């Protein structure tokens, strides 16, 4: 049985692994088989992570975090968690291919998932002109007219990046002001290839085998219009990945995992949560990493406290022996 299992491999998961490994907890980190590294694997240049004055590519940053976690002894397994049982003293985590894992504690760092428009043709045309990742797919839209849906930092970053390839980039936003930070707005406004379509939402996507346009509806008067496009990028936010924990962990009104104050403690003893899965507001790499630190320290303290109860449960005692 393990001391601690970490579910998730973004900045929160890897940072938790670094701290847990340095505390001799010998953590195992279960990263996704297809999305290891979290959202930063789909990000271009990261300019606001401390320690990189010239900026760093998102995938490179995550690779460095993984290497650092492994350097201190974290076992990283690229597999998907399919089921968890967190209520007892011994936590069980089931995976798709690597079998079942048991641990005295679990850190949930599953992050969030791209939000979709919910339109009928969205899934059908996914990968055929519809994308949620400019870094992944921008190359395929050379000299095309494309659009980005959204008004936050992610949308501005996507639009600006896509101007490297596309001949024109529309930004479609349902309001007449942006949520994005001023520096991201200024960059987008200053880019000659970017044109804003205000007070509009996408209500339809057309194309037989690939996207050829969208139907726009005015949020002011309800009128509809057609916009010809060669691609559509959706950047309207994210939803916390909590589906594995429904019925076990308490959630907030925002849908994130509820924790006790500034700690990472959930409603279940020995279960901790960190990163975007508990944060509906800030959702930055650096805040996620700090949250992972808190989770690892909370888990370490929890495991140490179990030693005092070791005589009541020899199995748990053997699992936490390495922490003291």
Image: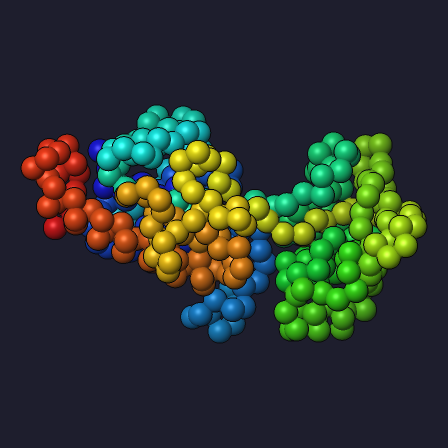
The x, y position of residue 16, in whole percent, is: 34, 52
Q: Is residue 98 left or right of residue 80?
A: left
Q: Quadrant of the N terminus?
A: top left
134 vs 91, nearest the viewer: 91
User: Where residue 314 sits in the image (x, y, percent)?
Assistant: 11, 33
Vertical position of residue 186 compared to residue 146: above or below: below
Q: How many marks?
A: 0
Q: Which residue is drawn at the image coordinates 45% and 63% (left, top)?
A: 286
Which quarter of the figure has residue 181?
bottom right
Q: Residue furthest front?
A: 253
Please tell me which residue is depicted at 86% across the width and 57% down the height of the picture. Answer: 220
Q: Nearer the viewer, residue 202 or 313?
A: 313
Q: Nearer the viewer, residue 268 or 121?
A: 268
Q: Is residue 15 visible?
A: no
Q: Position of residue 315 (x, y in %)?
A: 14, 32
Name the colour scheme: rainbow
Residue at 10% over, 46% down: 308
Is residue 245 shown to the viewer in this render?
Answer: yes
219 sits to left or right of 122: right
Q: Identify the residue shown where x is 31% and y is 34%.
A: 87
Q: Position of residue 192 (x, y in %)?
A: 81, 69
């Amino acid at each position: 049985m393990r001391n601690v299992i970490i579910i998730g491999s973004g900045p929160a998961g890897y940072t938790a692994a670094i701290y847990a490994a340095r505390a001799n907890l010998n953590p195992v980190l279960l990263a996704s088989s297809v999305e290891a590294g979290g959202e930063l694997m789909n990000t271009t240049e990261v300019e606001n992570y401390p320690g990189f004055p010239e900026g760093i590519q998102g995938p490179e940053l995550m690779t460095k975090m993984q290497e650092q976690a492994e350097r201190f002894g974290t076992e990283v397994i690229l597999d998907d968690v399919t089921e968890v049982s967190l209520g007892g003293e011994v936590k069980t985590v089931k995976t798709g291919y690597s079998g079942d894992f048991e641990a005295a504690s679990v850190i949930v760092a599953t992050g969030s998932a791209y939000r979709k428009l919910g339109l009928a043709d969205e899934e059908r045309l996914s990968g055929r002109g519809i994308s949620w990742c400019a870094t992944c797919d921008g190359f395929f839209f050379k000299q095309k007219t494309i659009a980005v849906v959204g008004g936050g930092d992610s949308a501005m970053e996507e639009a600006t990046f896509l101007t490297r390839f596309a001949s024109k980039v529309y930004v479609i936003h349902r309001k007449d002001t942006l949520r994005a930070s001023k520096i991201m707005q200024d960059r987008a406004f200053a880019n000659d290839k970017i044109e804003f379509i205000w007070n509009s939402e996408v209500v339809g996507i057309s194309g037989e085998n690939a996207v050829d346009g969208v139907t726009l509806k005015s949020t002011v008067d309800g009128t509809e219009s057609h916009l010809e496009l060669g691609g559509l990028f959706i950047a309207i936010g994210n939803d916390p990945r909590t589906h594995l924990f429904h019925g076990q962990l308490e959630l907030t009104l925002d849908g994130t995992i509820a924790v006790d104050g500034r700690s990472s403690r959930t409603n279940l003893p020995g279960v901790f949560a960190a990163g975007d899965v508990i944060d509906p507001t800030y959702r930055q790499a650096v805040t996620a990493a700090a949250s992972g630190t808190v989770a690892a320290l909370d888990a370490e303290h929890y495991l140490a406290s179990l030693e005092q109860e070791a005589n009541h449960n020899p199995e748990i005692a053997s699992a936490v022996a390495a922490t003291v």
